Amino acid sequence: MFVEIPRWMLVSLAVYLSIPLVVYFIIPYVWYGTRSTKKRIIIFVLGDVGHSPRICYHAISFSRLGWQVELCGYVDDTLPRSISGDPNITVHHISNLNRKEGDVSVLFMVKKVLFQVLSIFKLLWELRGSDYILIQNPPSIPILPIAVFYKLTGCKMIIDWHNLAYSILQLKFKGNFYHPLVLISYMVEMIFSKFADYNLTVTEAMRKYLIQSFHLNAKRCAVLYDRPAAQFKPLPGDVSRQKAITTAAFTKDYIRNGFDTERGDKIIVTSTSFTPDEDIGILLGALKIYENSYIKFDSSLPRILCFITGKGPLKEKYMKQVKEFDWKRCQIEFLWLSAEDYPRLLQLCDYGVSLHTSSSGLDLPMKILDMFGSGLPVIAMNYPVLDELVQHNVNGLKFVDRRELHESLIFAMKDDDLYKNLKKNVAQETENRWQSNWERTMRELKLLH
Ligand SMILES: *[C@@H]1O[C@H](CO)[C@@H](O)[C@H](O)[C@H]1NC(C)=O
Ligand SMILES: *[C@@H]1O[C@H](CO)[C@@H](O)[C@H](O)[C@H]1NC(C)=O
């Protein structure tokens, strides 16, 4: 005879016996997936990974600290070795829907976004149990809302602000803020970004803007400066500069007989858009004083070849000024170079000159970064925030007017020890700049301890 076991007891027993299974297998499976004991960060870019240098630098920096990095994006081109060869970084390809030639219909856009959403969800499911997710903004749709949703798993969200998505869209619609797409984009950006745990911005100006207009917490928002783009590299040590300047198509016509960098002649370069806030007149004035010093006091002053690249409203005026003066020791040439040739020209120069003064007083000139990247010390017009980038006698020389610029030029042209020292610091700094800056910023945000 059997004792009738009550149904509730059986159910309780089954529940009891399944507890270990749930606690040890199912919950970990659902919540942690394949994570290991290391800290894990997902880095998401809805663009080609190989063409998103900043995102790659983030990945490398987290990897150096021993984090497990899951880098998600489109992989169109071959990846740089620093990414593909790094055991701490796993690259995940997001599948993309390719647009048929000329298809700009709304239907296609909707399909594309839906497809993206599905692939992103699939990926995030595979990577569940991460500690952080870092996304780049723009684009904010669809990744921003998804990342906010993903925060439910206990993951912290970091937004790296490169720009504002809605303002870019607004430009496309002729500045119309009330275009429905612009409004939607603005709302998405404004609402969902409120959930970010940390904000990074590329400039101080951007940071201030976000704090004021989007009312974000100033303590959780930090500036992380860019580093020079990869095409700006110093001239390789085994290349002869004199030979390069006399053969390169964009310089050879300007090299006069007897101009010899190996015998101490110098090349300086400045790039400008010839607007009133960059006074090329100061440079021309200083070079005229240099001429005077050469004639009256010191006939050993090196020759200077000065390249001024760029175009803009005041170019004609300055070209005329240059033509009217009788130059003996300096030669000034106006160039307009392609994006490929400009980095090549920088490599061939001794010093970069920056006449940039910031109108807002908040931004740093990208061109100085590019000069540093090419290994050039800079002679820069000083203004308050420039201290963050250029230190006098360390990686460059600073001036405020044409007299000081002239003095700096004399030092720069004559003092080889100074030059070597500045150049050494520039090279070191370009190496270290990103990593140290990055670590400081992450510490500021209390992301690293
Ligand atoms: C990968 O992480 C380990 C620590 O887990 C670290 O020692 C190593 O330097 C990292 N590798 C790279 C290439 O940064
Ligand atoms: C990050 O920025 C967004 C808006 O841009 C803001 O709403 C959010 O509160 C910020 N997060 C922190 C932690 O400050």
Image (tube, rainbow, N blue to C red):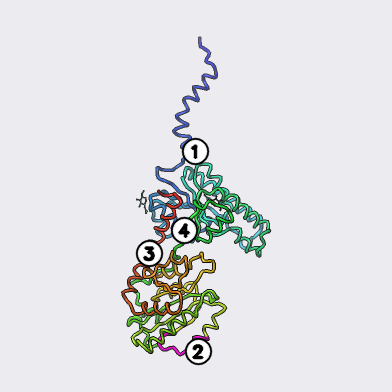
Figure label count: 4
In the rendered structure, which disc, 3 or 2, sits on the residue that comes first in sequence?
A: 2
Q: Secondary structure at mark 3?
A: helix
Q: Position of residue 432 (x, y in %)?
A: 38, 61
C-beta proximity under 8 Å, tags 1 and 2: no
Q: Secondary structure at mark 4?
A: loop
Q: Which residue in the structure is indicated by mark 3? A: 429
In the rendered structure, which disc, 1 or 4, sits on the residue that comes first in sequence?
A: 1
Q: Quadrant of residue 360?
A: bottom right
Q: Position of residue 345 (x, y in %)?
A: 43, 75
Residue 171, above or below 268: above
Q: Nearer the viewer, residue 143 or 6?
A: 143
Q: Which residue in the structure is indicated by mark 1? A: 30
Q: Which residue in the structure is indicated by mark 4? A: 224
Near mark 4 (Cα within 10 A), the count class, few <14, some 14-19 or many ≥20, is many
Q: Which residue in the structure is indicated by mark 2? A: 324
C-beta proximity under 8 Å, tags 3 and 4: no
Q: Is residue 423 visible?
A: yes
Give the CA distance from mark 1 to mark 3: 45 Å
Q: Which three-letter amino acid code belongs to the residue tagged 1?
A: Val
Q: Quadrant of residue 79?
A: bottom left
